[in-house]
Image (cartoon, rainbow, N blue to C red):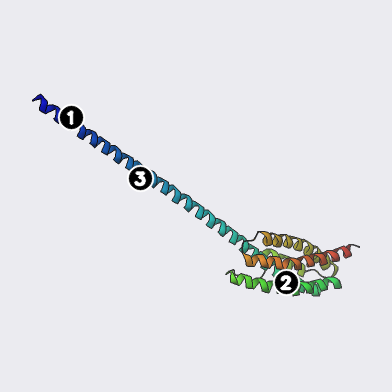
Amino acid sequence: MKKIMIPVCFASFLAFGTACNSNKGGENTTDSTTTTSTTGSTTMTDTGTNTTANAATADTSMANDSKFVLDAASGGLMEVELGKIAATNAASAKVKEFGRMMVTDHSKANTQLKAVAAKKNITIPATPAEEQQKHIDDLKTKKGADFDKAYVDMMVDDHKEDISKFEDESKNGKDADVKAFASKTLPVLNKHLSSIQSIQQGMKK
């Protein structure tokens, strides 16, 4: 009887060891699968975050370009209206001439800007914004030398501000068409500033 029992016990021990090894292999497989799944999930989350950030940046850039277009359009409308007023209310022949130049040059720029805005589905208002309209209403009430001084001083400040905005858009704008418009218009604005500063200096003598 003892000779028969020993082999049976030994066989049972081998079977138990084999089963344990099999379970350990299963545990390793599960750990590996879990790790792979977790890594994959992390990668997908990172990619989603980057995509969202890029989309937000693109939206901000387009918003900046759109704001530039709207501001430039409103400013252009004001320049035309004030130029018309200068042609009638100014006392100085040079100021009258400058006003006529504003009507011609800014009417042309406004037409070009409308074409760009149409391509971008940006609706440009037909009238100047509230701030620009206040300048128009204020200068309408002035005539002669009083008008000349107020108009010339305003044109100097306004063109300095415009040039700064157009330079920024030409360098940092994201939309190629809007950037091109800004770059193309800059020399005209610089010419205007030089002309009105010359008139301003002449008035101080």
Nearer to me, 16 or 156: 16
Which residue in the protein does label 1 denote? 10
> x, y percentage for residue 8?
14, 30
Identify the residue shown where x is 50% and y is 55%: 51
Residue 11 left/right relative to 146: left
* Mark before the other along the chain sequence, 1 or 2: 1
Q: Mark 3 against mark 1, which lies toward the viewer? A: 1
Which residue in the protein does label 2 denote? 106
Q: As shown in the figure, which amino acid type bears the numbered disc 1? A: Phe
Residue 162 left/right relative to 89: left
* Mark before the other along the chain sequence, 3 or 2: 3
Q: As shown in the figure, which amino acid type bears the numbered disc 3? A: Thr
Report crowding for label 3: few under 14, some 14 to 19, many 20 or more residues within 10 A (C-alpha). few
CB under 8 Å between discs 3 and 2? no
Which residue in the protein does label 3 denote? 33
* Mark before the other along the chain sequence, 3 or 1: 1
Residue 56 at least partly seen: yes
Determine whether the residue tagged by mark 3 lies in a helix, strand or loop.
Answer: helix
Residue 199 left/right relative to 139: right
Q: Which part of the image, by quadrant, shows the C terminus? A: bottom right
CB under 8 Å between discs 3 and 1? no
Q: As shown in the figure, which amino acid type bears the numbered disc 2? A: His
> x, y percentage for residue 99?
79, 72
Determine whether the residue tagged by mark 1 lies in a helix, strand or loop.
Answer: helix
Residue found at the far right of this picture = 205
Residue found at the far top of this picture = 2
Identify the residue shown where x is 10% and y is 24%: 2
Residue 194, located in which quarter of the rendered image?
bottom right
